[in-house]
């Protein structure tokens, strides 16, 4: 009997080993659901000339996805990595600024969805940078977006190996750069708003890459995979509204009217990019949309009970 159990255990272990190997060696495949979603959002892959946002903060993403480079003599920081396939465009933008990819020391993530973490694995490989994310998003990043509490397996990406986990309020120091991670969960469990200060001469501005606060098609009631989703969102609206915020930036530029502000800036309005109300206005609008959706789902739940 003992040999039988041992044999069963061994064969189980062997089967697991074979399976693990098969998973790690399987090349990343973009499913039809994701291909369709990317095609329906052409700005996510549309080229955008890189430019200085303010002082040492630069826009290096495609037109429709905020990817930011923060530079310092002691090493640079990149925030987010676009959809799968965007790495080439982001890297070309970074090189165009005269920045060496290998001088990027950290890649931070706002949240573990494929339109912001999609090509972080590639970017980490090409830059040699450490990947840093909120601890609650690490399992989703390491699963490459699979088994998302709201999207299931619809939007995967190449799994990301995270080298450092952060928690709410943690300040990260990279030489002269200081970045703070503010946990703003709800959109994902580890959704993060990153803040830092950029200075031109003596004029220093609070830069904020606001985490997404939308709940597109999310199950807000009885969500077994994310029971605290409503509480988390409510906390995050208040958190973002209260942040010192001179220059709101975002993973989706439209969240904070970024391109309209850039256009006004190009037309000669030197202050157009500065918007101290921007974070609060975004949080308020997001809360309004959220409350409406929550009321709708509560009403639906009441009628089906
Ligand atoms: Zn998202």
Image: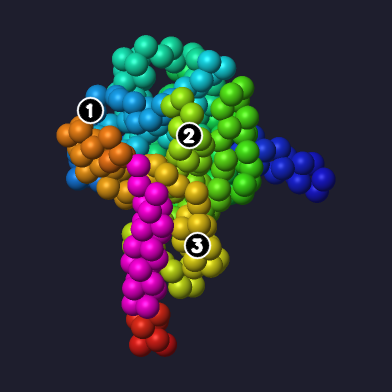
Magenta highlight range: 274-296
- Quadrant in which residue 96 is drawn: top left
Q: Is residue 187 magenta?
A: no
Seen in the picture, residue 51 relative to 301 is either above or below; the reply is: above
Q: x%, y% of residue 93?
A: 31, 20
Camera-near label (3 vs 1) is: 3
Q: x%, y% of residue 191?
A: 49, 49
- Quadrant in which residue 157 is drawn: top left
Tag 2 residue: 204
Camera-near label (1 vs 2) is: 2
Seen in the picture, residue 261 relative to 239 is either above or below; the reply is: above
Of pointers 1 and 2, the one earlier in the residue sequence: 1
Cα gap from disc 3 to disc 2, whole angstroms: 24 Å
Tag 3 residue: 238
> How crowded is the residue under tag 1: few (<14 C-alpha within 10 Å), some, or many (20+)?
some
Seen in the picture, residue 290 relative to 135 is either above or below; the reply is: below
Camera-near label (3 vs 2) is: 2
Cα gap from disc 3 to disc 1, whole angstroms: 34 Å
Q: Residue at x 43, y 35 (%)?
A: 80
> How crowded is the residue under tag 2: few (<14 C-alpha within 10 Å), some, or many (20+)?
few
Tag 1 residue: 47
Q: Residue at x 37, y 78 (%)?
A: 295
Q: Is residue 44 visible?
A: no
Q: x%, y% of residue 261?
A: 25, 42
Of pointers 3 and 1, the one earlier in the residue sequence: 1
């Amino acid at each position: 009997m003992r040999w039988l159990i041992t044999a069963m255990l061994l064969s189980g272990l062997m089967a697991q080993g074979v399976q693990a190997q098969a998973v790690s060696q399987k090349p990343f495949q973009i499913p039809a659901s994701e291909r369709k979603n990317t095609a329906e959002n052409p700005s996510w892959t549309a080229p955008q000339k890189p430019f200085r946002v303010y002082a040492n903060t630069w826009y290096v993403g495609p037109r429709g996805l905020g990817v930011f480079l923060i530079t310092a003599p002691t090493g640079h920081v990149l925030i987010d990595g676009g959809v799968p396939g965007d790495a080439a465009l982001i890297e070309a933008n970074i090189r165009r600024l005269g920045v060496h990819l290998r001088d990027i020391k950290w890649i931070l993530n706002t949240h573990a969805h494929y339109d912001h973490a999609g090509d972080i694995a590639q970017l980490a490989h090409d830059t040699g940078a450490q990947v840093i994310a909120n601890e609650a998003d690490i399992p989703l990043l390491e699963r490459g977006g699979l088994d998302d509490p709201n999207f299931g397996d619809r939007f995967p990406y190449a799994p990301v190996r995270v080298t450092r986990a952060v928690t709410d309020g943690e300040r990260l120091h990279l030489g002269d750069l200081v970045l703070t991670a503010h946990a703003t969960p709800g959109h994902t469990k580890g959704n993060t708003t990153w803040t830092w200060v950029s200075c031109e001469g003596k004029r220093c501005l609070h830069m904020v890459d606001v985490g997404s606060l939308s709940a597109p098609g999310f199950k807000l009631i009885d969500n077994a995979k994310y029971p605290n989703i409503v509480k988390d969102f409510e906390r995050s609206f208040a958190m973002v509204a209260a942040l010192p915020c001179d220059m709101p930036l975002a993973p989706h530029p439209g969240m904070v009217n970024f391109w309209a502000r850039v256009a006004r800036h190009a037309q000669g309005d030197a202050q157009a990019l500065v918007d101290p109300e921007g974070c609060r206005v975004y949080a308020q609008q997001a809360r309004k949309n959220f409350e409406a959706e929550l009321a709708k789902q509560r009403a639906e739940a009441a009628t089906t009970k």
